[in-house]
Structure formats: C-alpha cells, structure tokens
Image: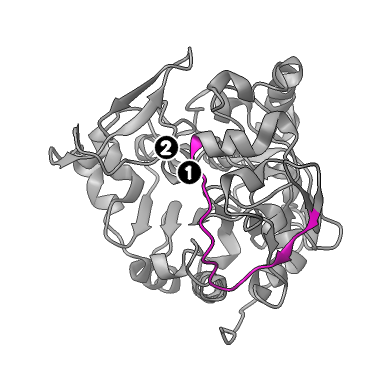
C-alpha cells in the first residue's frame, strides 16, 4: 500500500510548477472581460483523457498503455456500457500512478479492463464540440481519488482533507443531523482519521453571494456535494442547491441562467460505468443545446469535464502540487462564443482552474492556495474574435 508521501515523486519541480501555475497569464488575469455573464460547469463521471480523446488529432493522446509487467498493450475498444470493476480510490489512484511511471493501472482493475478507449463514433457530440470550440489536454483532477474530494474542489478549491467517498459504515453524522457513514480525512502529516461527512469552509458560492451574484446548483435529488458544507446545508443558501437537471433546461431556455451554475446530470446520463456513454453524450448535448437556443448563449462559458479518472488508463504523469494531487488527467471541453475555435490547450489546468476563471471574470478573491496559483484559462479564449455561432446537435442512436 502506498502512503501519501509516495506520491511526491516530482517534489523537486513541484514548487516551480506551482509558481509557474500562479503567474501564468498574469497580465491577462487582472482584467475582467465583461462579455461573460454566465458560467456553467457540467460535471460528468469517471473517464480519462486517453479513454475518450486518445486518438484526437493534435492532442496529447495515445492508443497503447504500459502495464506493471513492462508490457505495452493496445487500448481496447470500450463497450458503451462498461461492466469492468475498476478502482478509483485514493490508494488505487496512487498505486496506478506508480510514482509518475503510469504503469500500474492493471493492478487496480481486473486484468487489462482499465486499458480501453472510446471511439469518435461512440461520443460524436464531444468530438464535434472539440472541433468547433476548445479541448484541453492537460486538465487534471485535483485529488488522487474519487468523486467526493474532487467535487469539493469544484466548489471550494479544497476538499477539507477528504480523500475518498463516504463509507457505508455507520458512525458519522450528516450536516442535517442524521446518522450516516464516515469519510477518510488526511492531515498534513499523512495521518488518516474517519470523520463525519460535514465540513465548514468557504466556497465559491459564498464569494458569489457576497458579491451579489446569483448561483444555482442543479443535481437530481437536491443538494449534491453542498450537502456536506454545514453552513450551506443548514443556512438560507440551501435553497440555491435545490434544483434538478430538468430545472436547468427550463432556466437555460427561458433566460434564467444564474451567473454561476453547477450541473450534475442524472445518474443514467452521468457516464459513470456501467451507464451508457452514448446516453451521456446525448444528454450533454441536450443541456448545451438548451443554452445555445436560449437568450444567454452570447454571454456564456460552458465547461464540460469529469470528476475523476474512474480507474481508466491515462499516460500523462500528473504534476504533484501538494499532498492532495494533482490526480490523473480527464477531458475538458470549453464551449463558448469566446472559445478559440478548434483550439487544443496544452496549459496545465485542474478543477481549481475553473474557480480561478470565475474569480477572474467576476473580480472575486481566491479561496485557497490552489485557485490562487491556478491558470486563469484565458489562453483558451479570444474575446476579440467574432462570437462563435451556436452548434445545436441532434441526438444519435445508442446501442
């Protein structure tokens, strides 16, 4: 079993990367582009860049992977509804990365089931967006691990030390006071404790509210990750987190998009194995179509990305900025009238970069060292270009 310290294989360059990360595009980061009035993060589940875009022309992708035995194996065609039992926990992620060698993904899965790759024909909408807008091929997850800690980073540029999802074992208390499982939390020395899944730290929603800017969180079932933030779960802002994905479609089409929206698709369209990736591709297009056909398209930036690597293979070693990560690489699509057309960004991004972009656009302060150091992402935009037209895509037939 690897410890937290084992992931510091790039310690000699970590601080250099961190400061380079911080000062990249400094000249651009101090100006607000008034054209942006709405930012939408669509957060999908469990795929790596090589798993979805390894064959995309011009991107940093591969069609083969390395294994623990020293072999190079082809990335096999990915089933639409992948039944493989893959591990994406904190420990499994660190084991798969193997000190940056990226060759132990076979040890966290059944055989070579992590070594798969979707084709353009399976996810045609995503490839269409990449061709017409911007694709980022050096976007990494914030944490070596699964959904919860990475979702927290998309809200607050930190996870509060959380490194895994809530366990099924009792002993914890949710923010609403009900009994629940616990989550593993790691301290600065790498020590782990099991704690209740209820934390209290400042989120981007707090900054938006303080600035008088609107926000909504859309997740079927209500609340999502905001349910583990005590002051939001038990305070007046909780109503902002009580929105469904169907409500998002209504808001986008009717001109009621907030300044900031987080959108979690329904589970059947999340692309979390074994759910259909075709269904997820169609659902994402439905959400984006609603924005494009609504009145806010000309002032909106949409980010489509994935919470964690899901156990799938990726060949690019994540830079190690701190104890939490970075974790394995995932796709990021930037869809906007201001996105550079057909552009592939090779700039280092992570979940905190999304917050940095919002903070830059809306003149908000940073939340943590992570978003303070993150790229503004402005290399992927051209606010002086003629606005890109909408690209309304039809649904395609699924297996």
Residue holding disc 1: 146
Q: Main secondary structure of the magenta part?
A: loop
- Quarter in which the N terminus is drawn: top right
Give me the disc on residue 164. Answer: 2
Of 339 and 353, the residue lying toward us: 353
Q: Quadrant of residue 176?
A: top left
Helix, strand or loop at mark 1: loop
In the image, 73: left or right of 214?
right
User: Which region of the structure is painted magenta?
Assistant: 73-90
Q: Nearer the viewer, residue 200 or 114?
A: 114
Q: Position of residue 305 (x, y in %)?
A: 58, 54
At a point 57% along the width and 38% down the height, the residue shown is 93
Residue 237 rendering spot, x and y as whole percentages: 25, 44
Question: How are the colours assigned in the image?
Answer: one colour
Please say whether residue 109 is visible from this viewpoint. yes
Q: Find the residue positioned furthest to the right.
A: 58
Seen in the picture, residue 131 relative to 391 is either above or below; the reply is above
The picture places residue 326, in percent across and down from the top left corner, at: 62, 33
Q: Residue at x 59, y 30 (%)?
A: 325
Q: Measure how far apart labels 2 and 1 are at the Cα level.
A: 6 Å
Which quadrant of the figure contains the C terminus? bottom right
Q: Residues within 10 Å of mark 2 (few under 14, many from 20)?
A: many
Residue 60 in sight: no
> Height in image: 156 above or below 341?
above
Could you tell me which residue is drawn at 71 percent across and 72 percent down? 128
Taking the magenta stretch, the answer to whether it contains residue 89 is yes
Image x and y of residue 47, in percent: 59, 56
């Amino acid at each position: 079993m690897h410890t937290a310290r084992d992931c510091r294989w790039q310690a000699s360059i970590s601080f250099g990367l961190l400061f380079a990360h911080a000062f990249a595009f400094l000249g651009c980061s101090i100006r607000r582009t008034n054209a942006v009035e709405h930012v939408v993060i669509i957060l999908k589940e469990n795929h790596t860049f090589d798993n979805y875009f390894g064959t995309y022309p011009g991107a940093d992708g591969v069609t083969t992977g390395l294994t623990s035995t020293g072999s190079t194996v082809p990335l096999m065609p990915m089933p639409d509804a992948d039944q493989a039992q893959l591990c994406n926990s904190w420990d499994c992620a660190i084991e798969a990365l193997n000190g940056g060698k990226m060759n132990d993904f076979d040890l966290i899965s059944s055989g070579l089931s992590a070594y798969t790759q979707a084709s353009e024909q399976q996810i045609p909408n995503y490839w269409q967006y990449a061709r017409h807008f911007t694709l980022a091929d050096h976007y990494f997850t914030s944490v070596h691990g699964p959904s919860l800690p990475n979702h927290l980073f998309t809200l607050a540029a930190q996870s509060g030390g959380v490194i895994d999802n809530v366990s099924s074992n009792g002993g914890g208390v949710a923010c609403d006071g009900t009994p629940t499982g616990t989550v593993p939390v790691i301290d600065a020395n790498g020590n782990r404790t099991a704690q209740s899944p209820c934390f209290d730290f400042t989120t981007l929603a707090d900054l938006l509210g303080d600035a008088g800017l609107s926000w909504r969180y859309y997740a079927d079932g209500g609340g999502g990750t905001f349910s583990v933030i005590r002051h939001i779960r038990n305070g007046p802002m909780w109503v902002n987190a009580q929105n469904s994905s169907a409500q998002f479609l209504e808001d986008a089409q009717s001109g009621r998009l907030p300044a900031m929206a987080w959108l979690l698709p329904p589970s059947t369209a999340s692309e979390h194995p074994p759910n259909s990736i075709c269904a997820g591709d169609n659902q994402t297009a439905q959400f984006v179509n609603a924005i494009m056909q609504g009145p806010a398209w000309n002032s909106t930036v949409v980010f489509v990305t994935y919470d964690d690597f899901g156990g799938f293979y990726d060949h690019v070693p994540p830079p190690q900025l701190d104890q939490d990560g970075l974790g394995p690489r995932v796709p990021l699509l930037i869809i906007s009238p201001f996105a550079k057309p057909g552009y592939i960004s090779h700039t280092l991004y992570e979940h905190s970069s999304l917050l940095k972009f919002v903070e830059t656009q809306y003149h908000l302060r940073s939340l943590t060292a992570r978003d303070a150091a993150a790229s503004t992402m402005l290399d992927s935009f051209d606010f002086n270009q003629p606005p890109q037209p909408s690209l309304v895509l039809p649904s395609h037939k699924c297996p």
